[in-house]
Image (cartoon, grey):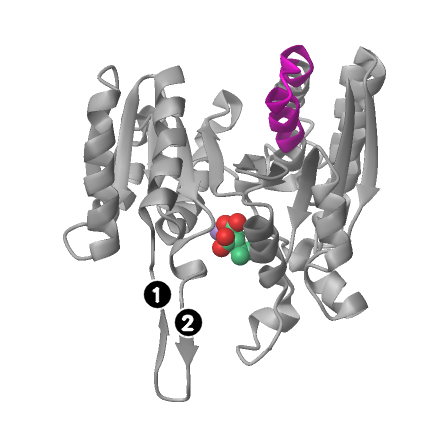
Amino acid sequence: MKLKIAVLPGDGIGPEISKQGVAVLDAVAAKFGHSFEYTFGHVGAEAIDLTGNPFPDETLKICQDADAVFFSAVGSLKYDNDPTAKVRPEQGLLAMRKSLGLFANIRPIQIFDQLSHMSPIKEELLKGVDFVCIRELTGGMYFGEKYRDNDRAYDTNAYTRVEIERILKVAFEYAGKRRKHLTVVDKANVLDSSRLWRQIAQEMAPQHPDITVDYMFVDNASMRLVQDPAFFDVIVTENTFGDILTDEASVISGSMGLLPSASLGTGTPLFEPVHGSWPQGAGLNVANPLAQILSAALLLEHFDLMQEAALVRKAVDESIRQCVRTPEIQEPGKPKYGTTDIGAWIVDFISK
Ligand code: IPM
Ligand code: MN
């Protein structure tokens, strides 16, 4: 298969993990006789430094011309601590999601048995944990009308029927392919936007009689995630709730550095780690590249390259099993491997 892939390394640890992800894709291409062609683009703080824009037109063009976007991370301390900054790296990511129509963010939460003792959750609660968060990504407060003066500010949590229906459709499809249990997370006891979500979900549910649908307030869902994570199969929720709940869900596995995600919609699909740019770790060769490498597996699966993706997943599992791990998930007394060591080990495993 021929694929054109737009590679956007971004900021912080982004370039280091991106390199390992691309090396893994190259190893897969060589092994299975595919041709992956990469075009590199600028995004985030590094794009602001170069062009003044966190998502330059040229990057948009590169993404639009590609079959997939392989993205890493944006964000920089310089902007985090400056609420007055007029342009921010994160705007690049938001502009990219919006302009590519990527309304569905798919974040699978998976437990690695070898790492379950590192989870902040008791091991006995982790049995059977395997769920997917489906986060709406181009609506809600992130994109609603905004205002700020010195004394007053607001962000509007606006959703249209069309936006809600299309993300719920994705969620019902995922649930249908999995354990057929969908949890719609909202705050319908307080918010009108949530009441519309719940109303539309209730309208759609009878068309999916095989799926058990339950409705949960977001505060309750955040509690349930740590009390009984095995309860969940597919969670669907709006943009801001999804942002918060997926960070919470991501640490259940023991390290945020393990979780990939896919953003899908009307334009070029995008694959990226759930974690951010970790500026403090940049350049130290300590960042865990596995979330980026598993994002490559999601990319391969998206194009139905199932055998290829399975080999990537096997290589990742095996690296963890053999304790070829970055410091944050390494066992005491075992050597600490760097970002490049993990990438090289996985490339080697795939190429054998
Ligand atoms: C995420 C991130 C982004 C978000 C930031 C970097 C804008 O936290 O992908 O979850 O809030 O959506
Ligand atoms: Mn987030």
Left or right, 189 with respect to 67, comes to: left
**What's the residue type where badge 2 is placed?**
Lys
In the picture, residue 54 is in which quadrant? Answer: bottom right
Which residue is labeled 1 in the image? 156
Q: Residue at x 20, y 56 (%)?
A: 192
Query: Chief secondary structure of the magenta span?
Result: helix
Toward the bottom, the furthest residue is: 150
Residue at 24% x, 39% y is 200
Residue 57: quarter of image: bottom right
Q: Between residues 298 and 20, which one lies in front from this camera angle?
A: 298
Residue 42: % across, % down: 76, 55
With respect to residue 278, does 31 lie above or below? above
Which residue lies under the disc numbered 2?
A: 146
Q: Which portion, as a residue range, is magenta?
A: 294-310
**Residue in view at x 63 percent, y 68 percent:** 77
The image position of residue 292, as x and y in percent, is: 66, 36
* Residue 38 visible: yes
